[in-house]
Image: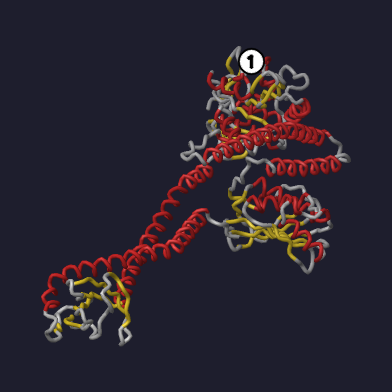
Amino acid sequence: MRLPSIRQRVARALLAALLGWGLLAVPLVGLVLHQAVDAVLDSTMQESTEILYALVQPLAQDNAGPLRIMPPSPHDERLVWQVISARGAVQARSVRSPAEPLAAGAAAGFTARTTQDGTAWRVYSIRVDDGGAMLHVAQRLADRKQQQMQVALVSLGTALLLGLFTSVWLGRRVRRELLPLLRMADAVQRHDPWLGGQLPPADRAELVPIRDAVMALGERLSKLVERERAFSAHAAHTLRTPLAGMDVQLAVALQESSPQARPRLLRTRDALARLNLVLIALLNLFRSDRRPQRQAVDVAALITHWPLVGLDVVVEQHAVLQADPELLTAALFNLLDNAQRYGATHATVRVLPGTDGVILRVQDDGPGIEAARLAQLQGAIDSPQQDRPADAALGLGLTLAAGVARAHQGRLRLLPCERGGCIEMSFLATAPVQAGTRRDA
Amino acid sequence: MRLLLLEDDPTLGEGLEAFLRGEGHVVEWHVRLAPVRGLRCADFDALLVDWQLPDGSGVDWVRRLRQSGVATPILIMTARDHLADRIHGLDSGADDYLVKPFAPEELSARIRAASRRAAGAGGGRLRLGDVEVDLAQKAVYRHAERIDLTAQEWRLLEALALRAGRIVSRRDLDELIHGGEGEASSNVVEVQLSCLRRKLGHGLVATVRGLGYRIDP
């Protein structure tokens, strides 16, 4: 499952905040802009009228003359004007001005008017003389709206660009702020509390409690491992020395024994050798500081002196396996010992190439395992210890073999077999060397 | 061979002593370091030392022995199987390191191998003039012809060959021939030496009057 990313979440929150702010701000800014642009346009009209005032005064005084229309100008005329006589007739006008008066009466100031051709106008009027002549300067409402729209679009574009830039900048800023967290993760990754090292000091206040917590956890683990090591060393000494003593006593007894007693003593010594193998395997496998010490192990040579009385073991491929010899001994011996105890008289050990390494296959002529039980055991092998159902308890042999396979990044598989039992242990990244040998136990 | 065994576990110590005696060695077994400190370690052919002893560390003692110039082969026997322990044990000056539990047969083989190496016969064969001694096969050749020896003759030859160049006293030879057990007859060494000289040549073993016997390498 992909976990949510803090950086993405913060960036998303910032983007949402920006969009929310934008949605709220756009109508307000639009309204303000609308008012401001309106005021600017009105002011322009007002100033234009005041400039025209001096120019059109002579025209207003010539109220008896014909209508005068100004010749077309070379530029796009946005404002139009009219001089209206006291009688209300258009005395003079700009070329694009409508023929009819833009405003009725002699009221000065801003008005709105829609002419007969349907054009809506904004009109500013002032008196030209005391006789009642008026000067109207007008602008089409459509032109005003177009100008307002242009301003709005430019503002919106600028705001969007600014938002985009801010979003990118904030994203980079957030990433930079998260870098100390990544550095700390890297330091934690390299941190080995067993070596007594310290994590580098936190360079952000928020990371101080995390660093302290990791250090405290490391110390707790370190003490735990220390206790385990002490126990392991003590257990090893307590168990290994008496076993060595028992073996040597049996060896002496064998030297001194009568021919009748020798078989009994030999069987006892074999049993002790079994116990030794299991004990060493257990001590190694469950020691937390023990990592597989891989080396080339000749499977055939490994099993040569194993006390497997009554079991004929054939190594079909005399293979050199990259594995921890003690762990491999524990696993393989227990699998063969299991086979023997369940009635097998013949076992074959093969080393085959696997997908990522090699597979060690042990096949015997014993009674095998029923399909239902096989599935149950495989489930137990593949599930963590605490998740195993009570009735799926593995024996020591399978537990050891599964543990050894896992220690070599491999897996233990129980395979359905027409006759007898078949078990495979995979070992990651090893290469078999071909040859052939046979060993009769 | 004359062996010094330092092991505090009585079952293992007593068992090893009996087993090694059964193999024909002379074994002196101690459970503490204190009585061993007064011994001349050069008189032994190999030292078998437990790491942890009631009155001190066997490994520290080995280091001190090496610093004082003792070259006798030393085997550490211990329950410590960590890689760091093995390195520490060997770096202290031990020639070999054996993790318990071990088969006494393996210990015996390692003692033989260490002694061969110490005697300059790492490959198992030692050339003494026109005589070649195969310590691993317990065989002896003169002019490339195999010479049959009795068990006592072999023990005598082995004891002298492993100490080639050094004088070995008659008492020591007596003890080595009899594995430190039983009463040695007063002239057994002379009789066996006479047989050896007859089979391998009179120049092989030299008599050093008043001190003992010597084979020159």
Q: Position of residue A227 (x, y in %)?
A: 68, 33
- Residue A59 sits above or below residue A176 on the image: below
Q: Nearer the viewer, residue A123 or B1?
A: A123
Q: Nearer the viewer, residue A292 or B190?
A: A292
- Could you tell whether A352 is left or right of A173 in the image? right
Quarter where residue A214 is shown: top right
Q: Nearer the viewer, residue B13 or A207?
A: A207
Q: How many marks?
A: 1
In the displayed orientation, state which residue is furthest to the front.
A131
Q: Which residue is mark 1?
A: B37
- Could you tell whether A116 is left or right of A342 in the image? left
**What residue is at 62 percent from the left and 46 percent from the top?**
A292
Q: Nearer the viewer, residue A204 or A384?
A: A204
Q: How is the image coloured?
A: secondary structure
Q: Position of residue A32 (x, y in %)?
A: 37, 63
Q: Position of residue A72 (x, y in %)?
A: 15, 83
Whether residue A377 is visible here, answered yes or no, is yes
Q: Residues within 10 Å of mark 1 (few under 14, many from 20)?
A: few
Circle 1 chain: B
Whether residue B188 is visible here, answered yes or no, is no
Q: Position of residue A394 (x, y in %)?
A: 78, 53
In the displayed orientation, state which residue is furthest to the right.
A260
Helix, strand or loop under label 1: loop
Quarter where residue A142 is shown: bottom left
Identified by mark 1, the residue type is Arg
- Could you tell whether B105 is left or right of A60 in the image? right
- Could you tell whether B212 is left or right of A186 in the image? right
Q: Quadrant of the N terminus of chain A?
A: bottom right
**What residue is at 39 percent from the left and 66 percent from the top?**
A30
- Residue A56 sits above or below residue B104 on the image: below
